[in-house]
Image (cartoon, rainbow, N blue to C red):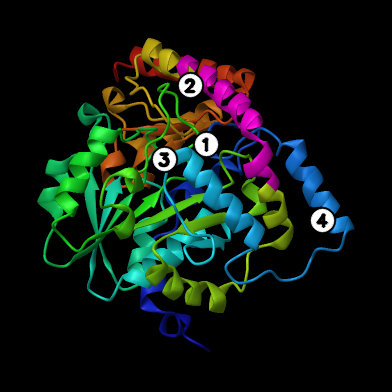
Amino acid sequence: MIDYNKVLSSKCRDLKPSGIRKFFDIASSVEGVISLGVGEPDFPTPWLIRNTAIKTLQQGKTVYTSNSGLAQLRTSVSGYIKHKINADYNPDNEIIITVGGSEAIDIGIRAVVNPGDEVLVVEPCFVCYTPIVTLAGGIPVSIETKAEDNFRLTAKALREKITGKTKLLILPFPNNPTGAVMERHDLEEISEVLKCTDIMVLSDEIYSELTYTGNRHVSITEIDGMKERTLLVNGFSKAFAMTGWRLGYLCAPAPLTEQILKIHQYAIMCSPTTSQYAAVEALNSCDSEVKKMVDEYNIRRRWLVNAFNEIGLDCFEPQGAFYVFPSIKSTGLSSQEFCEKLLYNHKVAVVPGDAFGDCGEGYIRVSYAYSLKHIMEALDRIRIFVNELKEKNFL
């Protein structure tokens, strides 16, 4: 008999499974569940994008592209970034088309992290950063954000975590799960801390189109001196409702992309060809479709924040992405307990806050990438649950 514990890499074996997926494995076994847990747009991919994909299939455009992606798509990405955040990236050698934003994060981290390097991870955050850092041999170091700071990274918190081993800062804004955004003055303060160091930044801006402040998204690459030390990650899943198309991109100075491309070459070869042709159409023709989705998300966002506050669960007002992050501390229950009781007793699935880092304890993540009718029905059940807790003197 083979002892698979000896066969497996210790790094892989010791990784914790995703707290999101673990919880939804449980939720999938309960009939009649209303889910507010998945971070996936409920809108169909805009027809212009789908139609372009259909035409390319009919035309037989199904062969490999270059490793870095279709030249036409890289040119479109370059123009899109210039228009949106006024950053110049050469489509010939500073842009790599990836299999979703997730691959861009993975190859970016692996390309710069050596064993023993410390990587600062701003939490709460998406679940993939720490495991990827660990697999690369790096040491993840959490920087906790707080509700009183609007879940933004502060210069003080950053400075306190920097050591001589710090190699990379992962900056995930607009943020999943909190919906927090970093404004220009916040980024300027962060930049002042970093400019006197050799620390790189991986800026995950996958939710950059989904903001609700009335001001456009600001990227750290726009701040003087930061583009040259930043790996910019973005993609098509969230803004263009293209989750299953698996397409993203990484932008960085040429000396970095030249090396990062080698990992992409050996692991992936190239991103899906049909998706790449469709993405050109997304970038060039779908601003109005994105705006419609953002307007609808904004309606849901405002309704959810008000509803949670009325229920008695204090809710930070998110300014980006499509999640709210209400506090359940007043219930006396842990995030896991709250979510499990809500699931089994009232058949509503949300995500425990501690799935996004230890500092997420005492919160739950609720997605508003669902219809308002769906959201309202789920909130009715949550209201009943919270009222039951009050009656039992838990509140």
- Helix, strand or loop status at disc 2: helix
Three-letter amino acid code at disc 1?
Gly
As drawn, the label of residue 301 is 2
Q: CA distance from mark 2 to mark 1?
A: 14 Å
Question: Which is closer to the viewer, label 1 or label 4?
Answer: 4
Q: Nearer the viewer, residue 52 or 336?
A: 52
Q: Earlier in the sequence, mark 3 or mark 1?
A: 1
Check disc 3 and report the residue beneath it.
Answer: 176
Mark 3 crowdedness (10 Å alpha carbons): few <14, some 14-19, many ≥20 = many
Residue topped by disc 1: 37
Q: Residue at x 58, y 57 (%)?
A: 74
Residue highlighted by disc 4: 56
User: Visible in this render: residue 15?
Assistant: no
Query: Which of 86 and 341 lies nearest the eye of the viewer?
Result: 86
Q: Secondary structure at mark 1?
A: loop
Circle 3/circle 1 CB separation < 8 Å = no
Disc 4 crowd rating (10 Å Cα; few below 14, some 14-19, many 20+) is some
Residue projecting furthest to the right: 58
Q: Which residues are magenta?
A: 281-303
Task: First in sequence, mark 2 or 3: give its number.
Answer: 3
